[in-house]
Image (cartoon, rainbow, N blue to C red):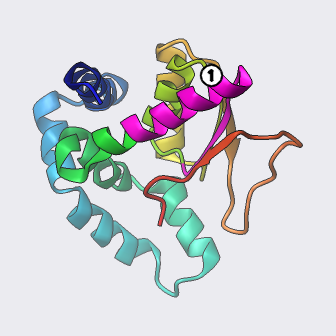
């Protein structure tokens, strides 16, 4: 893996934070502060919303959480700390090998989060389907797909599963979901 590939990927990953500033209207300094405190803020919010641990409460947390997105964005602030950059490069290399061998790559990102990997796969000429729970994070991902001009199919998941179209996928990714 070339250093130039890694640098380009880190620039793409860091763009997530800049995009969120634009999307939310919050300054970079404040977004960084919220990201750095994301785990604590999300934990407090979880404790407020999820009392009994029911599927409905958990779904409600992900659907309306104001702070979980900041916890999810921690690896985008410091990708090298979380190896997100290196792992994304490995996934992209695999997707490109599928394209080389099959002439196409249909990719499904289950738990697609803010959509960073979806955009990278789309840039690599994959047909991409994004799946995640509805809420602030998936709305931000939709905004990013539109902003960057990618036609990525977006499906909403539920606690009990997701209805996938009768498509065949060449690559299914579920990165950092559990």
How many callouts does the rendering have? 1
123 on left or right of 156: left
Residue 115 visible in the current orientation: no
Residue located 47% across and 67% down the image = 178
Q: Which residue in the rendered view is the most extreme toward the top?
A: 149
Residue located 57% across and 30% down the image = 97
The answer to which quarter of the image holds residue 122 is: top right
x and y, in percent, of residue 139 in the image: 53, 36
The answer to which quarter of the image holds residue 8 is: top left
Q: Does 110 appear above or below 55?
A: above
Q: Which residue in the rendered view is the most extreme toward the right?
A: 166
Stretch in magenta: 89-111
Residue on which disc 1 sits: 100
Magenta stretch mostly in which secondary structure? helix
x and y, in percent, of residue 24 in the image: 33, 30
x and y, in percent, of residue 117 in the image: 46, 35
Residue located 64% across and 19% down the image = 151
- What crowding class fits label 1: few (fewer than 14 Cα within 10 Å), some (14-19), or many (20 or more)? few
Q: Is residue 96 magenta?
A: yes
Q: Which residue in the rendered view is the most extreme toward the front?
A: 101
Q: Is residue 97 magenta?
A: yes
Residue 7 visible in the current orientation: yes
Q: Nearer the viewer, residue 50 or 117?
A: 117
């Amino acid at each position: 893996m070339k250093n130039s590939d890694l640098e380009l990927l880190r620039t793409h990953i860091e763009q997530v934070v800049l995009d969120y500033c634009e999307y939310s209207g919050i300054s970079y300094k404040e977004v960084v502060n919220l990201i750095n405190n994301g785990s604590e803020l999300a934990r407090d919010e979880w404790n407020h919303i999820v009392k009994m641990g029911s599927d409905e409460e958990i779904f409600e947390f992900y659907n309306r959480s104001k702070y979980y997105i900041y916890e999810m964005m921690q690896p985008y602030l410091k990708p090298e700390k979380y190896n997100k950059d290196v792992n994304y490069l490995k996934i992209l290399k695999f997707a490109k090998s599928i394209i080389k061998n099959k002439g196409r790559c249909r990719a499904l990102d289950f738990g697609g989060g803010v959509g960073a990997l979806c955009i990278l796969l789309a840039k690599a000429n994959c047909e991409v389907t994004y799946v995640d729970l509805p809420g602030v994070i998936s709305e931000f991902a939709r905004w990013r797909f539109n902003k960057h001009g990618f036609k990525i199919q977006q499906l909403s998941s539920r606690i009990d599963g997701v209805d996938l179209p009768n498509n065949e996928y060449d690559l299914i990714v579920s990165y950092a979901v559990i």
